[in-house]
């Protein structure tokens, strides 16, 4: 493919680091880690996650909901995430 037709993918290393750190801080045990891997990363259904992990789907759903809240609260305080949330320089403000 000619260079002018390629899509250049870039990464925001600060954002990746913030998400990685948030996952380490917010996962309280192995069950939380399995929930992240099966639902957030592999995008499995609750039933498939239950089959894969052996954890009841109601437990997975409760853990998922708790993780979302913890991750949201943690990430809202990260400057690299705040920078992404701001839509224009005129609307820059701290999201807490």
Image (tube, grey):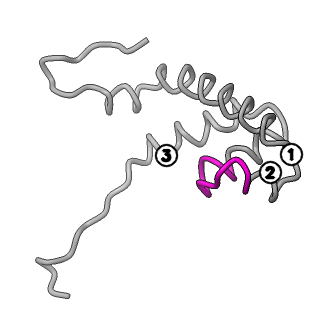
Percent position of residue 31, x then y: 83, 41
Q: Magenta region's main secondary structure?
A: helix
Label 1 and label 3: CA atoms lie apart by: 28 Å
Residue 45 counted in the magenta span? yes
Q: Nearer the viewer, mark 2 or mark 3?
A: 2
Q: Earlier in the sequence, mark 2 or mark 1?
A: 2
Dots 2 and 1: beta carbons under 8 Å?
yes
What residue range appears in magenta?
37-48
Which residue does the image show at 14% across and 78% down from the upper left? Answer: 5
Q: Earlier in the sequence, mark 1 or mark 3?
A: 3
Percent position of residue 33, x then y: 76, 44
Residues packed near mark 3 inside 10 Å, few (<14), some (14 to 19) or many (20 plus): few
Label 2 and label 3: CA atoms lie apart by: 28 Å
> Residue beneath label 1, please?
55
Label 2 and label 1: CA atoms lie apart by: 5 Å
Percent position of residue 64, x then y: 68, 34
Asked if 16 appears above or below 62 in the picture, the reply is: below
Q: Earlier in the sequence, mark 2 or mark 3?
A: 3
In-image side of 62 versus 75 (left or right): right
> Residue beneath label 2, please?
50
Where disc 1 sits, the SS reads loop
Q: Nearer the viewer, mark 1 or mark 3?
A: 1
Which residue does the image show at 65% across and 28% down from the upper left? Answer: 65
Residue at the farthest bottom position: 1
Residues packed near mark 2 inside 10 Å, few (<14), some (14 to 19) or many (20 plus): some
Where disc 3 sits, the SS reads helix
> Residue beneath label 3, please?
16
Residues packed near mark 1 inside 10 Å, few (<14), some (14 to 19) or many (20 plus): some
Quarter of the image with the N terminus in it: bottom left
In-image side of 17 versus 12 (left or right): right
Percent position of residue 11, x then y: 38, 54
């Amino acid at each position: 493919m000619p260079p002018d037709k390629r899509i250049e993918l870039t990464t925001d290393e600060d954002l990746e680091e913030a998400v990685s750190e948030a996952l380490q801080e917010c996962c309280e045990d192995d069950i939380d880690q399995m929930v992240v891997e099966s639902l957030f990363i592999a995008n499995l259904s609750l039933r498939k996650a239950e089959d894969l992990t052996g954890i009841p789907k109601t437990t997975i759903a409760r853990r998922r909901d708790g993780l979302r809240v913890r991750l949201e609260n943690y990430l809202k305080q990260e400057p690299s995430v705040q920078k992404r949330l701001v839509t224009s320089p005129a609307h820059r403000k701290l999201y807490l």
